[in-house]
Image (tube, rainbow, N blue to C red):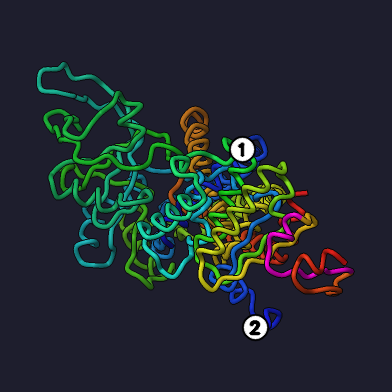
Amino acid sequence: MNSGIMQDILAGFRGQLQRNFWGILLLWFGLTIAAAALSLGLGMAQSTYGGIIGRLPGDLDRLYYIKAAEASGVSGSGAPSAPIQRRGVGNAFTSAALSRMVGEGELEGFFFAVPGRPFLVKTDAGSEPREVMAELILYDGYVHLYPGNTADALARAGAEGGIAVNWAFSDLGGGLRTGDVLELYPGRALPIAALVGRKAGGDPRPRVFVPLQAFPAGGGSPEVAVYTPRGTSSDEVLAMFLPIARGVSADAVVQVVSGTERYASSIREARTVSVVMSGIAALIAVVAYVNAGSFASLWVRERTRGLALRRAVGATPRLTAAYVMSDLVIITVVSLVAGYALVWVVWRFWLSAHRIAAVTWAGLAGACLIMMAGTAVLGTSLCRSANRHEPGILLRGAMR
Amino acid sequence: MDVTELSEAQRAETRRDRIGFVFQRYNLLDELTVAQNVALPLIECRGWPAARRRDAAQRAIDRVGLAGKERLRPSQLSGGEQQRVAIARAVVGRPQVILCDEPTGNLDSSTGRLVMDLLLEVHRNAADSVLVVVTHNTDVAMALDRALVIQDGMVTRAGAPQEVLAR
């Protein structure tokens, strides 16, 4: 396409803009709403789904939650009820035993939570330490607690001899940053080496992630989450942990719940929400495109004279199609940009305040793809109608 | 050449390469300048570079006496000037046939005479070209070499304009 054609396309577009500003504004507005609805709908669908599925991408089949309890406190299979814990059972799975299993390759990793407790934090060398509350997560080996690169971040924190905190702790706990120092227990202060989790849509409980080697005090928990090597079954996991629990208490029972079971209802719910959100977004896009189609046909009809004249002086059907498609692409691109700006405003001033993670790259890209596909379909039909009639007839019709 | 057997793309190329059109109502695009309107048939032309297209348009503009008005919009010109731009656009690609549909129909008689003189002069300067004018104006018809009278789609008379129109 030479510079003359580009110049002519832009001049034609400018002329159309001058002739029918309000019509074009309406067309843009409709497509902007479609772009925003698609971006938000797809983004919300993805983040809702990703909030559950993405939390453990591909790992649900090797994640197991294992709970030791008194025989009398367990209500059969499925999720365990609140167990009646005795001192021994309360520490059934000691960190030392679990760590040994990681070392021997029986587990890829594990973690368990220690309920909320106070920590002393120093944000710089000269400041007075202050006390904050957070849940402690002890871990070893491969641990994927949050979406994204959390496993890598935790591994890095461990390698650097530091700890990690989640966004809730860094934000709600007073703007902690990497490099700040946190006193885990008297005399044991460790730097924050990584911030993990995502701000919107994440778990709002403040948490500190401590690699086991940085926490030599030992300890244990009646409930642990373990990552097994691929292909390990529930029965094998049960056979692995029952002897450990029975070593603490002869009548202890062990319940094994796989990640897939534990998140089954959430996955179903997330899938439903994703389908509904995508459906609503698609519906809005279809309605917007039907309206856009009417406006765009009007647009082409109004450009008939210009197109007919160009055809009369020799524009080929390909060039006519290029004119129509260029118009539509310009409108679509401007609508996408405006739609994205609208999405950003909605997210920045409303959704983010409610911690709704609705803006995702996939949502934006999906909206862009759908809009461009819609434009291609619409443009093809408009190109046909623009080339259907003889230019002479169109000129007479347009002029008189 | 039987144009009815040509594809749409071939017909477009024929219109572009062999025919120049002058319409009764000028049919200029107001979003384009005079120079851009004149250069319109050259846009898709034979791989010409921009400079060559500009030069050809400028020569056509000079020929119709509109030098200095290249950057104006059609709406800034008089009716006669607009028809001159249309003539420049029709001849810019050096077509074999110049088709004029009532080229003076929208102009007052004196401007119409000037436009017709210009058309004839342009035609004389373009070797091997044919000027075809559709008109109801006998003065315009008398200025041409040959006249055909068409009634209900059929040629009823043909010959020198003086003879044909005298009958």
N-terminal label among 2 and 1? 2
Q: Which amino acid type corresponds to the residue marked 1 in the rendered image?
A: Ser
Residue A395, quarter of the rendered image: bottom right
Report the residue at 72% width, 44% height from top: B109
* Quarter in which the C terminus of chain B is drawn: bottom right
Q: Which chain carries label 1?
A: B
Where in the figure is residue B136, as x and y percent of width and height?
80, 57
Say whether residue A59 is magenta: no
Q: Mark 2 lies on which chain?
A: B
From this viewpoint, is residue A78 visible? no
Q: Nearer the viewer, residue B105 or A92?
A: B105
Is B76 displayed left or right of A123 in the figure? right
Where in the figure is residue A117, as x and y percent of width and height?
31, 29
The residue beneath circle 2 is B1
User: Which SS class for mark 1?
Assistant: loop
Q: Which of A43 and A53 is in front in this view?
A: A43
Which label belongs to residue B78?
1
Is B160 displayed left or right of A316 in the figure? right
Report the residue at 58% width, 43% height from top: B81
Report the residue at 41% width, 60% height from top: A2
In magenta, the rendered stretch is B139-151
Where in the figure is residue A9, as x and y percent of width and height?
51, 52
